[in-house]
Amino acid sequence: MAQKLSPRQLAQQAWLNTLPPKFERIKKVIELLSTHHADESQVRSLQRLVDELKAQASQVSITPLAENFGYMGTMLRRAGGHQTKVRGLHELLAGARINFEGACREASTPATPDVAEEDVSP
């Protein structure tokens, strides 16, 4: 008997499938920031994007990604050295991709039934 994915896992998979193009967009803006070619509107757009991704990740119960996107939003808003900000965003994006892979694995693995749910009567 093939095990099915829970509705929560299906919702997570649907949301996770939308992330790869958004990761590319984030990477592009970070690269523009590192070469001093990003204008203020692109930075604000990136802030909105990571805030939306944080809220969406929380909504589908993927906490590690939600925290990662929250840290990215904080990094974008903070004052300080430009290169420090760019380096931090690069590292946070790498962490988000790692968390993304883990979330994909978790969302695609059927949950094992608990012993309490199985019929153990003889």
Image (cartoon, rainbow, N blue to C red):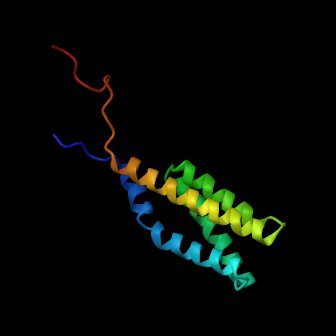
Q: On the rendered structure, is 85 left or right of 14?
A: right
In this view, the residue farthest toward the right is: 80
Residue 116 in picture, x, y percent from top left: 32, 22
Residue at 55% from the left image edge and 76% from the top image edge? 25
Question: Measured along the vertical axis of the image, is residue 20 above or below residue 42?
Answer: above
Judge by depth and name the residue closer to the eye, 41 or 28. Answer: 28
| Residue 51 seen from this side | no
Q: On the rendered structure, is 12 left or right of 39?
A: left
Q: Quadrant of the N terminus?
A: top left
| Residue 3 seen from this side | yes
The quarter of the displayed image where residue 74 is located = bottom right
Residue 35 in picture, x, y percent from top left: 70, 82
**Number of residue marks:** 0
Residue at 26% from the left image edge and 46% from the top image edge? 4
Residue at 71% from the left image edge and 69% from the top image edge? 86
The quarter of the displayed image where residue 31 is located = bottom right
